[in-house]
Amino acid sequence: MVGSRREKSAETEQALKDAAQRVFAEHGYLNAKITDITTAAGRAAGSFYNHFASKEELLQALLRDLAAQGDEQAATSEHNGDFADPAAVRFHVAAYWAFAREHAVVLRATAQAAQVNPDFARMVAGFGAEQRADIADHVADFPERGLRLPGRVDVSLAMMFAAVDGMVRMVEDDALAVSDAEAIESISRFVYRGLTGRDY
């Protein structure tokens, strides 16, 4: 009986998360109401608060899910942590591009929430800093190898993420017509040259 209650609770939580993404895609995060989410999930309005204290808390749960998925991707055998190797840069750009495209709705909702909620903005900034810190070792030995980053490690990696994020946003907004393959190749060349000063 306890197991079935837990399963039902987990099902409801997942249904709310899935519904939230559909509602955010249709209305935007700022215009989305909790009742929109529960209706889209086919759940009673009060059920939301059994799982989340607020819309922001639900969005944080979605971000944690994304972070866990990103960690799983990084653990693959194809992972190469040497950014002096253009193939390693391309692997990371391709992985992040696919991740950002797949989860564009949640990432856009996160940016919208950060615009109106200073606490959420700080949390998002911390999340981004953690993501950059996770790959700081990919460029840490550059000075010993005669390679000069364009700025501090965290600044240089922030520019890498910004390049991908900016391109994803333009593609998602239909402001730029480019295939995934062309985008990944172009960004990889841009990032590799920017980080190493070498030709790709």
Image: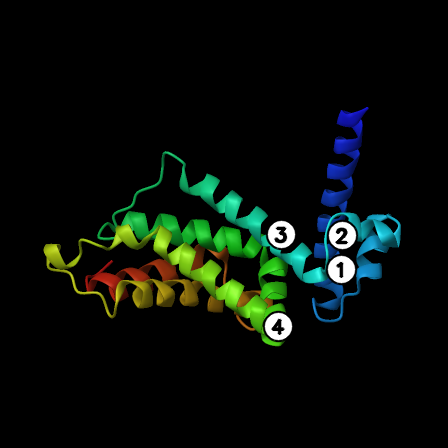
Q: CA distance from mark 1 to mark 4?
A: 20 Å
**Front-most of residues 148 and 137:** 137
Q: Say which of marks 1 and 4 sits in front.
A: 4
Image coords of residue 62 (percent x, y): 62, 52
Marks 3 and 2, the one that precedes in the sequence: 2
Name the spot of residue 87 as percent of width and height, x first: 29, 48
Q: CA distance from mark 4 to mark 2?
A: 22 Å
The quarter of the picture where residue 149 lies is: bottom left
Verify CB contact (< 8 Å) between mark 4 and mark 3.
Answer: no
Residue topped by disc 3: 62
Name the residue carrying label 2. 19
Residue under pointer 1: 23
Amino acid type shown at disc 2: Ala
Mark 4 nearby-residue class (10 Å; few <14, some 14–19, many ≥20): few
**Image quadrant where one finds the C terminus:** bottom left
Residue placed furthest toward the top: 1
The kind of residue on which mark 1 rests is Val
Residue 82 visible in rendering: yes
User: Who comes first in sequence, dot 4 or dot 2?
Assistant: 2
Left or right: 78 with respect to 86?
right
Give me the residue at 35% from left, 41% from top. 79
Q: Which amino acid is tagged 4?
A: Asn
Dot 1 crowding, Cα within 10 Å, few <14, some 14–19, many 20+: many
Which residue reaches farthest bottom?
116
* Callout 1: SS: helix
Alpha-carbon span between mark 1 and mark 3: 14 Å
What x and y, as percent, mark residue 164?
44, 63
Residue, disc 4: 117
Q: Amino acid at mark 3?
A: Leu
